[in-house]
Amino acid sequence: MSNLTAIAKAVAAGKTDAAGWVTQALKEGVTVKDIVSEGIEIGLVDLEERFRRNEAYMPEILLAKRSAKACMDALGDKVTAAL
């Protein structure tokens, strides 16, 4: 499983250990843009689709938000530098 897939799955599951996957992806040279768009965003979109099908509920959304925030915190200043 690639780091981006692991990030997406961890965010969708609301796991805060997603930040560790972000750190590992950065060490392996994955770009910030790819981490955000192919990792964090994919996880959130997956959860959104499950929510629309009534397969996920508000507590899961809140946990995913916390996980996505942990990922963004792990990226730190690299996000603004990448823009």
Image: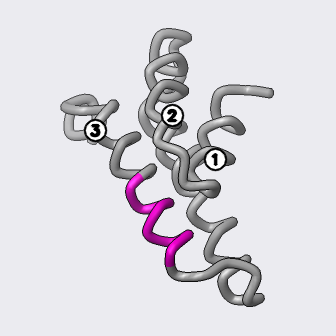
The disc labelled 3 sits on which kind of residue? Asp
Give the answer, above or below, for where 42 lies relative to 77: below
* Residue 13 in picture, x, y percent from top left: 63, 55
The disc labelled 1 sits on which kind of residue? Ala
**Residue range corresponding to the magenta coloring:** 59-66
Considering the numbered disc 2 on the image, is that residue within a helix, a strand or a loop? loop
* Residue 77 in picture, x, y percent from top left: 19, 31
Badge 1, how many Cα within 10 Å: few under 14, some, many 20+? Answer: many
Residue at image x 47%, y 61%?
Answer: 63
Which of marks 2 and 1 precedes in the sequence?
1
Q: Does the stretch in magenta take in 53? A: no
- The answer to whether the residues at label 1 and label 3 have Cβ atoms under 8 Å apart is no
Residue at image x 74%, y 26%?
Answer: 2
Please give left or right for residue 32 compared with residue 12 in the image: left
C-alpha span from label 1 to label 3: 16 Å
Q: Quadrant of the N terminus?
A: top right
The residue wearing badge 3 is: 73
Considering the numbered disc 1 on the image, is that residue within a helix, a strand or a loop? helix
* Residue 41 in picture, x, y percent from top left: 54, 56
The disc labelled 2 sits on which kind of residue? Asp
* Label number found at residue 17: 2
Give the answer, above or below, for where 68 lies relative to 17: below
Please give left or right for residue 57 compared with residue 59 in the image: right
C-alpha span from label 2 to label 3: 12 Å
Give the answer, above or below, for where 55 lies relative to 18: below
Which of marks 3 and 1 precedes in the sequence?
1
* Label number found at residue 56: none
Q: In which quarter of the image is residue 33?
A: top left
The residue wearing badge 1 is: 8
Badge 3, how many Cα within 10 Å: few under 14, some, many 20+? Answer: some
